[in-house]
Image: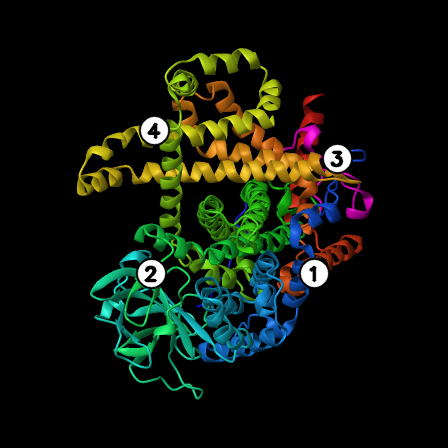
Amino acid sequence: MTTDLPTTTTAATPTALPDSAKPSVTAATAPDRAASPTPTGPIPVPADGSPRLDVGLVSEALLGNWADARRAARERAARPELHRPLDASVAEHRERVYSQLQDLAEEQVSWPMLPEHLGGPNDNGANVASFEELVVADPSLQIKAGVQWGLFTSAIVQLGDEEQQEAWVPGAMSLETPGAFAMTEIGHGSDVQSLATTATFDPDGGEDGEWVIHTPFRAAWKDFLGNAAIHARAATVFARLITGGVDHGVHCFYVPVRDAEGNLLPGVKSEDDGEKGGLNGIDNGRLAFDHVRVPRRNLLNRYGDVAADGTYTSPIDSPGRRFFTMIGTLVQGRVSLDGSAIRASQLALHIAITYATQRRQFTAADPTRETVLMDYQAHLHRLLPKLAATYAGAFAHEQLLQAFDDVFSGRGDTPEGREDLETLAATLKPTSTRLALDTIQECREACGGSGFMAENQLVGLHQDLDVYATFEGDNTILLQLVAKRLLSDYTSELKNVDRAGIGRFIAQRAEVLAKRHTPWARLGQSVSDRGNARRAFDSMRSAEFQEEMLADRARVKVEEVALALRGTARMNPADAAAEVNKHQVEMLDAARAHADLVRWRAFTAGIEALDGPGAESSRAVLTDVRDLFGLTAINDDLAWFLLSGMISTQRGRQIEGDLRRLLWRLRPHVLDLVAAFDIRPGHVRAPIALGGEQERQDEAAAYFRAQRASKDAPVSEKVLRDAEKRARRAQEKKASSR
């Protein structure tokens, strides 16, 4: 039995466009017919004199501060020898990716990450920017490279001293020493602080003491580790440091695991995780240690060290702060996944929107030519909000990358700077990876059966990015970290208000909170709009209105949780934890509201920063995109805004109509907007977006054009019946008039 895949799931009946929003079409784009009052493309363009996106200018803005590094990386990612294979076995894919990784090592792609004393430029921003671009070549290659240099090598650089770096970093960079990053345990995935693997100091071992690395039970096995199944020769192992009978918490150790021939060293156990739901070019596996001994100096000792007599010292007295400082040095993974997810969304949108401007279905608008998918309102509605969110995410990521580089270069390496960086990374990584998965799936469905074909990339891309929501910090856990930081900042703000200012603070907060309990804010909006839909539309599209709504929502949601938890300070730890657990969903909601505000502000700042010829016109188009993002965020939480009294009922009813008008306004710009992503043919590799669909459409149009011109063309039964009905009605009318 065969199954016919539907070509599209978009509604067949287009909605009529208002005159002011109809995309224009030229004779060149519609050679078979005169311009229609409701044109169907294939590529509607902005009307003469209307704003037009300067693709080069916007593309340059999206490249950001490390434009040269991104351009070079995009050229690299377009090379066929680095691309994801479609029909390889797991074993073949793994070997292919390892060979590709050796090529990248020879090209020194991660050299920018090295500090000056190791011969590098200490350009961490350039290193991460380059790494992110690999996702469009093969996500397996990207993550394999990330494990080797972004995790294994970076742990040595960030947690070790100069002597340790000089001993181990060169081999890691050259791939002479493939490495694993052994943090996660089967029994403690996100709860790193509770890891069970131990590193017990034996002062009588070796020349000046040894560490005994041990896995005490099955749940303490390290799992899901890239390179662990086959290729790793060493691992940076996170274990509980125990000396003199005292557990000093989790620290990192450099532990050899295989010899030069790939044989496991004594005491080291390994298992292969086997085939996964994606990223099968990586040899993920498990590691365990049966009293494996390594020298005392194999403790990466930036934040804690042990002398030969077993004495422990640390520059940070607090065990908790020491742990979080150490973990914070590994934030690079979250930063890079944020940018990678945005790049993957850009690729998916490029494929789906290109296809949608060429693929034609149904003839409701024109008896001789079908309508392009992009001219259906439903299609615009499913893709353009994702496009707007991707733009917002791209501008937000550039701010994150700048903050990361500031801290890791040393320019902004302060406790406050690191804390802000960690919070921003924890805000954006869950947001962008969730967006990527939703966007890729929507693009897959928007391409119908063609989107389900492996050759068109979308299915494989979704499979590979699925786990991006889990590793480098589970998305839900990261959002909880954001919520805790927001609550902490709110509490600190209250503590820091002096007696003279407490009245002003209470009055200020009362003004915001009062909106939730009185009709005055809604009445003010209704009076301002005076029942005029256009006035309401202009008001809601103002930057001030959107920022006020998003900022107040973020603030009030934090305040509501803070008020609900105010009694926990007087509870015992168990009761306090139970009370927090009762409000966990609200905490996550507050974190997501914060993420929306961060992205909206970053998008707005990116628009304002545009400069030079074409900037004014580009700002006009991108402002529409920003408004689509902002109003979508408000509309998605409209019930909360209405119940909180922040938006009037009239404006609440108006938002859906405003969003539809923005979709039509942006329709002529969709190809320019995806062109600014600089997705190249070597990145696309999807026949439906590389001319294959257009060739089919052109062939079909030529066939039907010739058929219509031919005297031998068959006549439609429907046409004959319609002609008969018209003739019959004419005869009846003539007879009745006698």
Mark 3 burial class by Cα count in 10 Å: few <14, some 14-19, many 20+:
some
The C terminus: image quadrant: top right
The N terminus: image quadrant: bottom left
Give the label on residue 560, or none.
4
The disc, 1 or 4, on the residue closer to the chain's N-terminal end is: 4
Q: Residue at x 54, y 64 (%)?
A: 453
The amino acid type of the residue labelled 1 equals: Gly
What stretch of residues is rendered in magenta?
Answer: 14-41
The disc, 2 or 1, on the residue closer to the chain's N-terminal end is: 2
Question: Closest to the observer: 356 or 127?
Answer: 127
Give the label on residue 616, or none.
3
Q: Residue at x 35, y 38 (%)?
A: 587
- The residue identified by callout 1 is 691
Residue 679 lies in what quarter of the image?
bottom right
The disc, 4 or 2, on the residue closer to the chain's N-terminal end is: 2
Q: Residue at x 55, y 70 (%)?
A: 84
The amino acid type of the residue labelled 4 equals: Glu
Residue 721 lies in what quarter of the image?
top right
Q: Tell me the element at label 3.
A: helix
Q: Tell me the element at label 2.
A: strand
Disc 3 + disc 1, Cβ < 8 Å? no
Structural distance between the alpha carbons of marks 2 and 1: 64 Å
Q: Residue 378: percent from the left, percent from the top?
A: 55, 41
Disc 2 + disc 1, Cβ < 8 Å? no
Q: Residue at x 29, y 59 (%)?
A: 249
Q: Tell me the element at label 1.
A: loop
Structural distance between the alpha carbons of marks 3 and 4: 41 Å
Question: Which secondary structure is most common in the magenta stretch?
Answer: loop
